[in-house]
Amino acid sequence: MEERPLWAPWRLEYVTGPKGDAGCIFCDAAADGGGEMVVHVGERTLVLMNAYPYAPGHTMVAPRRHVPSVTDLDDAESLEFMALTQRTLRAAREAFSPDGFNLGINEGKVAGAGFADHLHLHVVPRWGGDVNFMPVVAGTKVMSQALDSAREALRAAF
């Protein structure tokens, strides 16, 4: 099989960007009340786009307070965290019409958390056929929608 490149210039920022102690994306988003990737800011939680998504519309729900675990949330944070997760699912259904979702929390670096010190829940819309031969054969993920387009669709649905 002939290898052919898939042009993905957005990956350069990820590959060459800051590593380690570059700050916390969730705290930064909560502090400035928004930002380019933020979809919604609640009293205790926020929703933002994943800058390096697994699928179009991949968002993250996070408490505004910097805590590493679900067990660190107080009752009000827990309630809003789940309520905002539900609202994110409803908005994503309206914006993208997916066939299903992957929801997940990776607690700790060994569990795959990129930001292990700040709890966050991934909401990943999925469609029949979206994980096809490309990741298996070519080791490539095909994104069918740009981040800013997905963010605007979600904001409108919120």
Image (cartoon, rainbow, N blue to C red):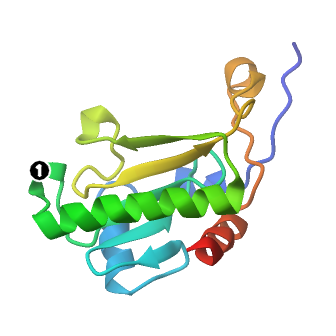
44 sits to left or right of 150: left
Regarding residue 66, the answer to whether it shows in the image is no
Q: Residue at x 14, y 60 (%)?
A: 73
Q: Position of residue 65 (x, y in %)?
A: 20, 71
Q: Is residue 103 above or below residue 51?
A: above
Q: Residue at x 39, y 86 (%)?
A: 33
Q: Which of the pair 86/44 is nearer the observer?
A: 86
- For mark 1, what is the residue? 71
> Nearest the camera: 81 or 151?
81
Which residue is situated farthest in the right direction here? Answer: 2
Q: Residues within 10 Å of mark 1 (few under 14, many from 20)?
A: few
Image-based side of 54 in relation to 82, left or right:
right
User: Where residue 117 sits in the image (x, y, percent)?
Assistant: 21, 55
Q: Quadrant of the C terminus?
A: bottom right
To which quarter of the image does residue 103 belong? top left
Q: Residue at x 67, y 74 (%)?
A: 152
Residue 142 placed where, x, y %? 75, 40
- Residue sitting farthest toward the top: 1
Task: Give above or below for 80 relative to 101.
Answer: below
> Could you tell me which secondary element the residue under label 1 belongs to?
helix
> Above or below — where is 71 with respect to 21?
above
Along the line of sight, the residue nearer the viewer: 2 or 72: 72
Percent of width and height locating residue 69: 17, 50
| Residue 14 visible in the displayed image | yes
Residue ID at (87%, 12%):
1
Q: Examine the rendered structure and indicate whether residue 104 appears above or below residue 12.
A: above
Dot 1 amino acid type: Thr
Left or right of residue 138, residue 45 in this image: left
